[in-house]
Amino acid sequence: MARKLPAKDVVIIGLGWTGAILGYELAKAGLDVVAIERGPWRDTATDFPPAYAQDELRYGIRLDLFLRPEQETLTFRNKANETALPIRNFVSFLPGNGVGGAGIHWNGQTWRFLPTDFRLRSHLEERYGKSMLPADMTIQDWPVSYDEIEPYYDRFEKLCGISGKAGNLRGKIIEGGNVFEGPRQNEYPNRPLVQTMAGSLMEQAAKESPTDTLVNAVWIPITRASSQMRANQAAQAVATLEVSTPYELGSPPKGADYWPSYIRGDAYLHLGDGAKAAVEYQKILDHHGINPTSQLYYLARLGSGRAYALQGDKAKAKAAYQDFFAAWKDADPDVPVLKEAKTEYAKLQ
Ligand SMILES: Cc1cc2nc3c(=O)[nH]c(=O)nc-3n(C[C@H](O)[C@H](O)[C@H](O)COP(=O)(O)OP(=O)(O)OC[C@H]3O[C@@H](n4cnc5c(N)ncnc54)[C@H](O)[C@@H]3O)c2cc1C
């Protein structure tokens, strides 16, 4: 039976970042606010205590913090003339579910847009001429400018305690920050995070070779993506390596040496996308000439086996595992990756 609840000034449906900020501001202004959230209640002390071991199966595979496609079906089509079909896997576009919404598990990266992003149409026309944009391209300027929104960026950064270093403070360019950013009125509220050793070495390399394409578009992204994989950030690793795509078939010593495809394959396996992982490993297997002695070439066979197994194609998976075992027949039997591969292969029988 319908239940009539006490009247409120404001009812917010869904309590993610947007609802929470609105609720906070409206309540502060004296209004009586209630928020209705479809997902569970979560709080830091009980759900995310610092000593808590992350449960990979629960969160990484079963996506406990997100809305799952079977809970509320969304459909998608690539073209207007296609029949929209249910989305079975949201991949990296994971909808929030529960108090806090997607903000419960975001990565906390809070870049500001550049001033030109707010006037993109005008900017592109000024730079490349009016004829550059096709008539049916819908790029628009925003109705607000960077200068108008800057105080709100500042406020949000303070609200969240964002860390970083200004590169443009009230028009003054500052070495060590992002010198291309729009002018900010204030420094970040927190200092930049300490770089890892790999990050520091790569920063030094970028400074020493600012125009070296292979350093900047291949080796720095490879290093960053490897760190992201270690931090269990597979989707970000894929995004990081996008810039390497035109150079991914380069040969050693300076070229990519299979790494972008290999890391991407690994990332797609982590994301549960066997088809995309198989494509990446196949790129390696199709180009033995890039580095005939590379271990990655042989490990790509194992990757292929895993990718086919993930897709349920046992025959192809077994063949790929067998290729890998044949290539590694003289390896020490206790090498961890070989042991893992044998266990996986046994499960395919
Ligand atoms: C894995 C991941 C990483 C991210 N990393 C970053 C990052 O580093 N930096 C960044 O800026 N952004 C990041 N984002 C994006 C950012 O988290 C989201 O843009 C932001 O949290 C969206 O907030 P929102 O309140 O608008 O929506 P949501 O967080 O989606 O909140 C909407 C809420 O409404 C609820 N709801 C929906 N429908 C109903 C209904 N009918 N009844 C009741 N409740 C309902 C939902 O359960 C949800 O809690 C990331 C997103 C994801 C998924």
Image: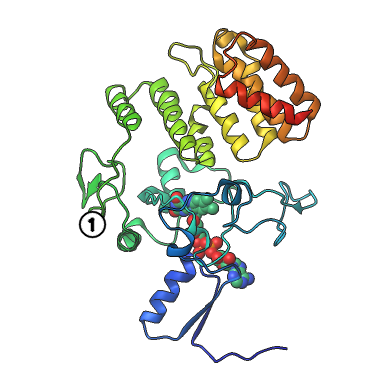
Q: Quadrant of the N terminus?
A: bottom right
Colouring: rainbow
Taking depth in this image into account, of 115 and 66 the one nearest to the observer is: 66
Kind of residue sitting beneath label 1: Gln
Q: Residue 154's spot in the image, x, y percent? A: 30, 60
The total of numbered circles placed on residues is 1
Residue position marked by numbered label 1 in the rendering: 185
Vertical side of 338 occupied by 84: above or below? below
Q: Residue 106's spot in the image, x, y percent? A: 47, 53
- Horizontal arrangement in the rendering, residue 38 relative to residue 192 (left or right): right
Q: Residue furthest front?
A: 334
- Horizontal arrangement in the rendering, residue 171 relative to residue 256 (left or right): left
* Mark 1 closeness class: few <14, some 14–19, many ≥20 residues within 10 Å: some
Vertical side of 143 occupied by 343: above or below? above
Q: Residue 96's spot in the image, x, y percent? A: 56, 60
Residue at (40, 61) in percent of width and height: 144
Is ligand 1 less than 8 Å from the beta carbon at label 1? no
- Horizontal arrangement in the rendering, residue 78 relative to residue 96 (left or right): right
Vertical side of 318 occupied by 153: above or below? below
Element under disc 1? loop
Residue at (39, 22) in percent of width and height: 215
Residue at (51, 88) in percent of width and height: 8
Q: Quadrant of the C terminus?
A: top right
Taking depth in this image into account, of 84 and 147 the one nearest to the observer is: 84
Residue at (45, 70) in percent of width and height: 20
Q: Residue 121's spot in the image, x, y percent? A: 47, 49
